[in-house]
Amino acid sequence: VTSLLTFTRTKKEKYEWIQLVGHPGTFKEGIHDGYVLKQLNENERICCELLQNDNLRNFVPKYNGTIEDDEGKFFIEMEDLLASFHEPCIMDCKIGVRTYLEEELEKSERNPEPRADLYNKMITINPLAPTEKENQEKKILKPRYMIWRESLSSSQDLGFRIEAIKKSRGLMSKEFQRIKERNDVKKQLMDFIDNSLPRATGYYERLVELRSTCTNSDFFQTHELISSSLLFVHDGNKASLWMIDFGKTRLLPKDISITHRKPWVRGSHEDGYLFGLDNLITLFHEIIHE
Ligand code: ATP
Ligand code: MG
Ligand code: MG
């Protein structure tokens, strides 16, 4: 009887694995109970390994090494953060003021061919965005497009943006990436927690703890965190969050240190991670005290 119960529960947990963003097929069931596999990215693997022994270890999924599947594909095995929840509500927030690496920008500049497809993408979103010159050419340079895209969401102004939300039993929504205004973001956060004070308090306290841990973390002081997310998870009054997605997290060049707060300028490597945390903390503080 005991083993049957265990089996049923395991099945249910695995069945309830939910992936909010990213390419389908990147994730699959882990070898061990309560773990998932994510397609190997060497940069991410190194980060996961370093983080296991860092002060931030309680803010990241446990990492269990790499695995090769039958087709010869490699994966990292990490803790399924949803495993201890029954019917979780989940939110993926991308932290930072930009979501591309400086090297990606440089790469796009090595090919200075203006592109009509990017011009068309831009005018579909905002016909007023192109400059006069761009309108004449009906083409746009990729770096210019990459920088512009960041201004569509709250990333540039608030240092974070909501990527996706899945409420328990509710549908998943990814309609957030164009939400830019502080008040609109706040409304989405309040809606996500169903205006619950215990949830707001839970998230607030965890965020404050994360921020102070970041400032005491060797990993955080020596890395640039781009396109990394916080995964918010609550169920009833239990609310917690973790750092995920280190595919674009990089060791800083030796001669460079960053504040994670100052605005980014080319070459500074600033990521705006703490700026984003500051804003999330202030927003949850306001939600609690309203
Ligand atoms: P992208 O780079 O497009 O954001 P990705 O392939 O790097 O995607 P992640 O961002 O790491 O993938 O994860 C995608 C989604 O999978 C997250 O939004 C979250 O819903 C889920 N997820 C990722 N890691 C975990 C984990 N350890 N436990 C539970 N859910 C997770
Ligand atoms: Mg991600
Ligand atoms: Mg990623």
Image: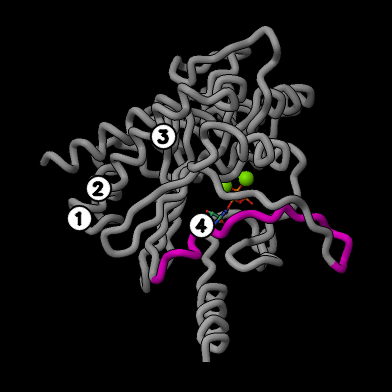
Reply above or below: 283 against 234.
Answer: above
- Residue situated in front as seen by the camera: 62 or 221: 62
Highlighted magenta segment, given as a residue range: 70-86
Which amino acid type is shown beneath numbered disc 4? Leu
Q: Which is in the foreground here, disc 4 or disc 2?
A: 4
Quarter of the view holding residue 254: top right
Dominant secondary structure, magenta: loop
Q: Are marks 4 and 1 in contact (CB under 8 Å)?
A: no
The image's mark for residue 81 is 4
Q: Secondary structure at mark 4?
A: loop
Mark 2 vs mark 3, CA separation in Å: 15 Å
Ligand 1 lies under 8 Å from the Cβ of mark 2: no
Residue located beneath label 1 in the image: 196
Mark 1 crowd level (few <14, some 14–19, many ≥20, 10 Å Cα):
some
Q: Is residue 257 magenta?
A: no
Which residue lies at the image location 51% right of the left edge and 58% below the top edge? Answer: 20
